[in-house]
């Protein structure tokens, strides 16, 4: 069982997600760059389908991912341009969020920054058959970054200046 | 934005190692200022300053128990602080677990493996 994903906040405008996979780097790269594979795992929240998964993976190429809620038909998506394509080690994209039908304040996309892009950098390294992915997301501002990380919170928005999981190892009752 | 101010207070409070150590101690049970000051080479007034920061952020509260006035942890405030990132992390982790399954599948079928290499 691979180690679970770790999330850190390297700076005010960034989020970094690190995850290892028990697979060769080429496969993990393929899973991120081939639409037929991407569809399999980049399903959004439960109850969401992915009607659009267009990816032209080359420098200057565009992509669009779109999700649709099975129950109410609401849609949202991400779209953008690839700015660096160095398979299988590095992929950089300039990404925009399309709030679609879920941009209202109480909707799942309500906190997401719109208008300004996020720069997503994916770096893949392999050692002994295990691939490490470092996904670095850089936003235009702290507010935009915080808004993006707040996605998924249904009530309240809190944020951190640094990794808090270390803090909790000191015998917190109840907190994980 | 009131909420944003509250968040700033919370995380400024957590950004100090002495205050984090105080929280860790209070997680084991309430304590007076004297008891909290003991492990640190710090005067009581200095500790009280830290306690005020934590109180303002809602991370600890004071039991107005006449003489002793011990401080206690407000765990919900702390849990909420971590929940924020944790829920975001969980979204990614859910997706990555699906990716794990896909990668396993791809590696299990020799014919597919040949196709995806290079």
Image (cartoon, rainbow, N blue to C red):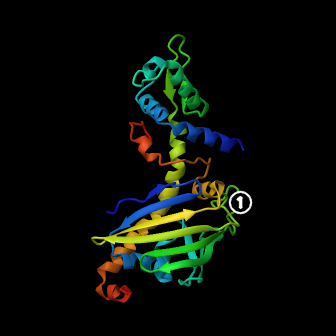
Above or below, comparing residue B32 to residue B7 in the picture: above
Q: Where is residue A54 in the image (x, y as percent from the top left)?
A: 57, 82
Q: Is residue B42 visible?
A: yes
Above or below, comparing residue A82 to residue B7 in the picture: below
Q: Where is residue A141 in the image (x, y as percent from the top left)?
A: 65, 57
Nearest the viewer among A43 and A127 is A127
Q: Is residue A118 left or right of residue A126?
A: right
Q: Can residue A176 be seen in this view?
A: no
Q: Where is residue A68 in the image (x, y as percent from the top left)?
A: 61, 72
**Farthest residue in the top direction?**
B67
Q: Mark 1 points at which residue?
A: A104
Q: Which residue is drawn at 56% across and 25% down?
A: B49
Nearest the viewer among A15 and B74 is A15
Above or below, comparing residue B66 to residue A20 in the picture: above
Badge 1 marks a residue whose secondary structure is: loop
Of the 4 image quadrants, the one containing the N terminus of chain A is bottom left
**Farthest residue in the left direction?**
A128
Q: Is residue B83 left or right of residue A174?
A: right
How many numbered circles does the render carry? Answer: 1
Q: Is residue B82 left or right of residue B99?
A: right
Q: Mark 1 lies on which chain?
A: A
Of the 4 image quadrants, the one containing the C terminus of chain A is top left
Q: How crowded is mark 1: few (under 14 residues within 10 Å), some or many (20 or more)?
A: few
Q: Which residue is drawn at 50% across and 80% down?
A: A85
Q: Position of residue B51 (x, y in %)?
A: 54, 26
Above or below, comparing residue B25 to residue B95 in the picture: above
Q: In which quarter of the image is residue A150?
A: bottom right
């Amino acid at each position: 069982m691979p180690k679970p994903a770790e999330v850190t906040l390297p700076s005010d405008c960034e989020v970094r997600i690190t995850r290892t996979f028990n697979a060769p780097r080429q496969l993990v790269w393929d899973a991120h760059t081939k639409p037929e594979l991407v569809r399999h795992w980049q399903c959004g929240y439960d109850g969401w389908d992915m009607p659009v998964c267009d990816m032209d993976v080359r420098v200057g190429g565009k992509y669009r991912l779109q999700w649709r809620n099975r129950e109410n038909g609401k849609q949202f998506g991400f779209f953008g341009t690839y700015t660096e394509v160095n398979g299988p080690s590095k992929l950089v994209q300039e990404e925009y969020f399309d709030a679609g039908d879920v941009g209202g304040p109480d909707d799942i996309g309500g906190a997401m920054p719109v208008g300004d892009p996020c720069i997503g950098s994916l770096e893949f390294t392999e050692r002994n058959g295990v691939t490490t992915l470092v996904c670095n997301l850089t936003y235009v501002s702290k507010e935009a970054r915080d808004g993006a990380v707040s996605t998924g919170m249904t009530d309240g928005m809190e944020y951190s200046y640094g990794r808090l999981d270390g803090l909790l190892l000191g015998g917190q009752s109840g907190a994980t | 934005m009131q909420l944003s101010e509250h968040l700033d207070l919370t995380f400024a409070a957590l950004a100090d190692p002495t205050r984090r150590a105080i929280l860790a101690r209070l997680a084991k049970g309430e304590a007076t200022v004297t008891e909290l000051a003991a492990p640190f080479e710090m005067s009581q007034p200095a500790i009280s300053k830290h306690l005020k920061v934590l109180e303002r952020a809602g991370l600890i509260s004071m039991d107005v128990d006449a003489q002793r006035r011990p401080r206690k942890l407000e765990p919900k405030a702390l849990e909420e602080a971590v929940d924020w990132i944790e829920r975001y992390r969980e979204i990614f982790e859910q997706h990555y677990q699906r990716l794990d399954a896909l990668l396993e599948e791809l590696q299990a079928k020799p014919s597919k493996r040949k196709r995806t290499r290079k």
